[in-house]
Image: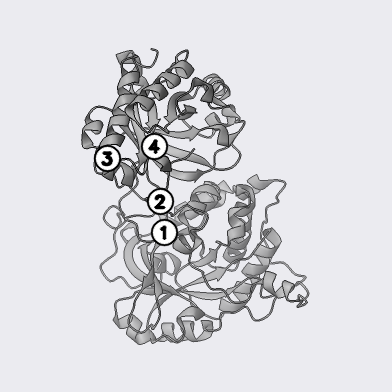
Amino acid sequence: MSASAADSNIYNDSTYSSESKEEDQETSPEQILRAGASPMVEPATQSENVSVPSLSNPFNVFDIYDAHQKYVKLHSGDKSMIYKKAEGIDVSYAQGKIDWQAVKDSGIDYAIIRAGYGNANKYPNQVDTWFKYNIEEATKVGMDIGIYWYSYADDIETARYEAESCYEVIKDYDINYPVYFDIEEPKHKNFSTARVSEIIESFCSTIESKGYYAGVYTFASLLNTKIYQEVLDKYAVWVAHWDVPAPGYSYSYGMWQYHATGRVNGISTDVDLDHCYINYPYLISPDTYVPDGTETDSSAQIYPVNIDKGVAKGIDVSVWQGKIDWDKVKASGVDYAVVRAGYGDLATQTDKYFEANMEGAEKAGIDCGVYWYSYASSPEDAVLEAEACYEVIKDHKFEYPVYYAVEDSSIAALSNQQITDIINAFCSTLEKKGYYVGVKSYANFLNTRVDASVYSKYDVWVAHYGVSKPAFNKHFNMWQFTNEGQIDGIKGYVNCNYAYLDFPGIMKSAHKNGF
């Protein structure tokens, strides 16, 4: 069972409104069809020289040459101009009539304007109702301009038509920020990684063929789990993750939507706020760009704090993941797995897949740790749980600690002292048997319900999702950073972790955990 996400609901199924940009949409294609409207005839022509991948061959999206050319473009020319911190907003019809001079005077450097949504060649009236006003008035006052197009695409053909629709709307305007493909519909979360990636590739390659600098916008968890990195390497990345010190996305990005309820002079409603770190106006129009002295050749001082990914990347698994192809897990870059041994105070409560998971991971060359899920209500119960855990794990070696997972809602009514005593009882029992022991729970619980003395005796594995660093105020050596990871060889979501110690070296040199 995964850790509680009480600290942050960023990655829960219900959090599209807490990370994504579009909450209230105009009529969608699906709604039009349900209402009985007849779709217009699809245009017969395709743009020239656009390579669109096939679902039967998803690796067509891996155009390494194009990715390399984008890298060359980004790192060519005057390198002192590549990076620049700029403050922006993104707007749509939802903001109503905007006083763009007041926006400009308030210190906003650029605006990403919604041009429309869906396939306007197929469904009429899907140009944003305030697009013409916004782009013309923002341009008049000297704002830098980018574009986003909100997607409902289910496949590569629809995505290409969306790109064609976008082009028809924006083709007569000067744009010096990327044209972003906004992919964030709930259905997209349920598509395969290959399908999402090729939809993005279809739109972006089409809009690039028209002479635009293409980008992709979505929330951090979808960037992490549903898009091949080779695709993201080819296009500008705009990540949405609100009210955190840094976005929960550890790869390259040029823009971050960090707040959804900002207030800016000249706009009467809430508005999304954005930081930009790449000097897109220079990259897009180097011949006409006028420097202002804030450009730099180093990103070190302008990007938010990077995520510390530790020395090893791991997963934790249980019966909930079902049958796992451990060879594929290993090939995906996973260094270790913390396997659930069982729960409660009986050895008969062994996790159904414990032995299979241990055997598969060991054969694949993946280092292992173990955890036992607690329901103890007293130190006496905790000792019984420790004895049960020992009976299950005693014939195995573990390169990673034996963790006591204390996070069940049944312990909420216990006092802090009772919880501390329970943890000490379990951990000390197994420590006497030669195991390197730790406690695992979510950050708020560890901060508020456990006496700090525990942390000087036992290791800590903290769960906190959607943040750049766990909000745990003591030392820890493992961090469960998401419960929506997707790993080759595992169906559905899996918890992902970073480890900060060379645990295998420690176990072997200290002769712990069966070594």
Query: In the image, is 329 to the left or to the right of 379?
Result: right
> Is label 3 in a helix, a strand or a loop?
helix
**Lower position in the chain sequence, tag 2 or tag 3:** 3
Where residue 104 sits, quadrant-wise, is bottom left
Q: Is residue 203 left or right of residue 56?
A: left
Residue linked to disc 4: 498
- Which sits in the foreground, 4 or 398? 4
Q: Which mark is residue 466?
A: 2
Q: CA distance from mark 2 to mark 4?
A: 14 Å
Residue at disc 4, secondary structure: strand
- The mark nearer the N terminus, 4 or 3, is 3
Q: Residue at x 38, y 17 (%)?
A: 513
For marks 2 and 4, the one nearer the N-term is: 2
- Using a 10 Å C-alpha cutoff, classify the residue at mark 4 as few (fewer than 14 neighbours), some (14 to 19) or many (20 or more): many
State which tag comes first along the sequence, 1 or 4: 1
The residue type indicated by label 1 comes to His
Along the viewing direction, whichever of 232 and 413 lies nearer the viewer: 413
The label shown at residue 416 is: 3
> What residue lies at 60% left-to-right and 33% top-to-bottom?
322
The answer to whether the residue labelled 1 contacts the one labelled 2, judged by CB atoms less than 8 Å apart, is yes
Q: Which residue is mark 1?
A: 241
